[in-house]
Amino acid sequence: MEKKILAIIPARGGSKSIPRKNIKDLAGKPMIAYIIKTVQKVRDINRIIVSTEDKEIATVAKQWGAEVPFLRPERLATDKVPTLPVLQHVLEELKNRENYIPDYVLLVYPTSPLLRPERIQDAITLALTHDAESVVSGTLVKGHYWQKTGDEYHRLYPVAVENRQLTVPLFKENGALYLNKTAVLSSRIVGETMWPLLMEEGETVDVDEPADFQQVEKIMLSR
């Protein structure tokens, strides 16, 4: 049976590091346009909704083919609000307005303009093949890690000192995509059982600072 998969792209208007970054011109297009066009190329995605409180972002998102059936409340648009209540707001509104309840929710951000549609399809295939609660993108990293407590640092991983080549690698989220069964989002952003979608280091860039924006723009222009 075909699953209903909803893509949600959060894009609030406020940004301190890069003003108006979600619609800032990136190699000839507003940055949010790239992730919208990427998701449109994924055959199993049924709907694409941008969650924003900003009317200009809403207009741009619609111009590039996304839905913005309602605006996000201002209380959910501050930099201190986590993503989970934003997703819950979208799902609640869709249920109340349309009685629409997707089977899976794909979370992607405008700040991942290099994300490729094949990787999103890989995540969907993983989820459907394994009936996974969640699929999260990331990379494998090796190393010795320390955690600061007060003024001191304590060994976090590995607990026992060993050669780096013997260390079991850790999975590090890269923030490019999260795919969840809708039921998971009633209480958490990732389910208790998660399948990793492994990416290469540098395959995607999270545009958070001006240097990230410049790096991605250079890549875009080189293509």
Image: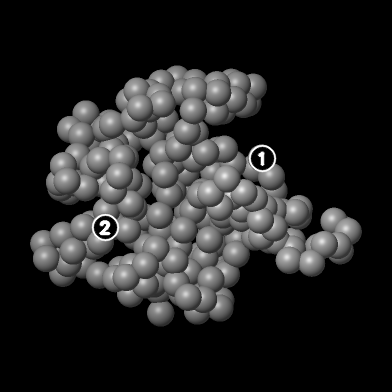
**Quadrant of residue 90 within the rendered picture:** bottom left
**Quadrant of residue 4 within the rendered picture:** bottom left
**Distance from the alpha carbon under mark 2 to that under mark 1:** 29 Å
Q: Earlier in the sequence, mark 2 or mark 1?
A: 2
Q: Is residue 96 left or right of residue 13?
A: left
Q: Nearer the viewer, mark 2 or mark 1?
A: 2
Most distant residue in the left direction: 97
For the N terminus, which image quadrant? bottom left
The amino acid on which the numbered mark 1 sits, given as a three-letter code, is Gly
Most distant residue in the front direction: 151
Q: Which mark is residue 202?
A: 1
Coordinates of residue 31 in the picture (x, y in percent): 42, 30
Residue at image location 64% in from the left, 22% down from the top: 222
Q: Nearer the viewer, residue 40 or 216?
A: 216
Coordinates of residue 127 in the picture (x, y in percent): 51, 71
Q: Nearer the viewer, residue 50 or 74?
A: 74
Asked whether residue 174 appears in the rendered view, the answer is no
Secondary element at image label 2:
helix
Coordinates of residue 140 in the picture (x, y in percent): 70, 56
Q: Which residue is mark 2?
A: 85
Q: Nearer the viewer, residue 41 or 98?
A: 98
Secondary element at image label 1:
loop
